[in-house]
Amino acid sequence: MDWSIPGTTLTAQRENADGIQEQLAAMFLAGGLTLSQVAAVSGLEPYTVQNWVKRGFLPPPRNKRYDMEQLCRILNMNILRGTMPLEQIVRLMSYLNGDLADESDDLVDDTMLYIFFVRLAARARYIGGDKNWDDALLHVTQDYPEKVPGAREKLTKVLKVMLTVWCANCLKAQAEDLIAKL
């Protein structure tokens, strides 16, 4: 069954969510993505991405090209922005990875955070409560190599917040559709 890949305008088979990393990597075979390509993939206006770069939430493109890690940071932020203020998004990302401008202190890079989240979101319709969410979180992060003690716990907390916000965004969109049909 086709579903919208979280944070993007792209669709894919929900059952193939574990292959999302390969799908993303294929977009970068010719090098990085231009701002217009990033905007097309994310559904964001180019000025939004430029604003995030200007405010230090995102490293600037290299040679006017965005790499996969930058795209994934944009997609992670895009997933959250529907119901979470930008300041809280930055706080959440900083909780996991410290200074957003310094990748050397990251517990998990933005690409892997996005991959973990997509795998979790693909399972979201099958998980009903906190216990099931915890089981799903363990499943999707089982290959995470913990860099420092406690990193897995931080990653799990961030993914749980992301899943909750994403579910809230889905419900918000559903409510807006229902209201439009009144």
Image (tube, grey):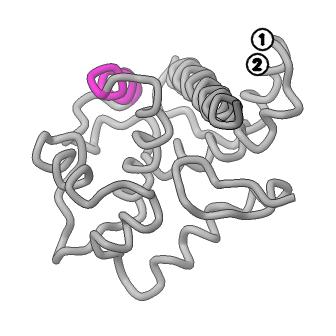
Evaluate whether residue 57 shows in this view: yes
Going 50% across and 39% down the picture, which residue do you hit? 79
- Amino acid, disc 2: Asp
- Is residue 159 at least partly visible in the picture? no
Check disc 2 and report the residue beneath it: 134
Decide: marks 1, 2 in contact (CB < 8 A)? yes
SS label for mark 1:
helix
Q: What residue type is disc 1 on?
A: Asp
Residue situated furthest front in the rendering: 182
The answer to whether residue 35 is left or right of residue 56 is right
Say left or right for 76 vs 134: left
Q: Quadrant of residue 64?
A: bottom left
Q: Residues within 10 Å of mark 2 (few under 14, many from 20)?
A: some
Residue in the foreground of this view, choosing between 74 and 11: 11
Q: Which residue is mark 1?
A: 130
Residue drawn at (65%, 33%) of the image: 170
Q: Which quarter of the picture shows residue 63?
A: bottom left
All told, the count of numbered labels is 2
Secondary element under disc 2, as helix, strand or loop, is helix
Q: Position of residue 182 (x, y in %)?
A: 70, 30
Residue 97 at x, y percent in the picture: 35, 31
Magenta-colored span: 86-96
How far apart in space, not on screen, are marks 1 and 2 (Cα)? 6 Å
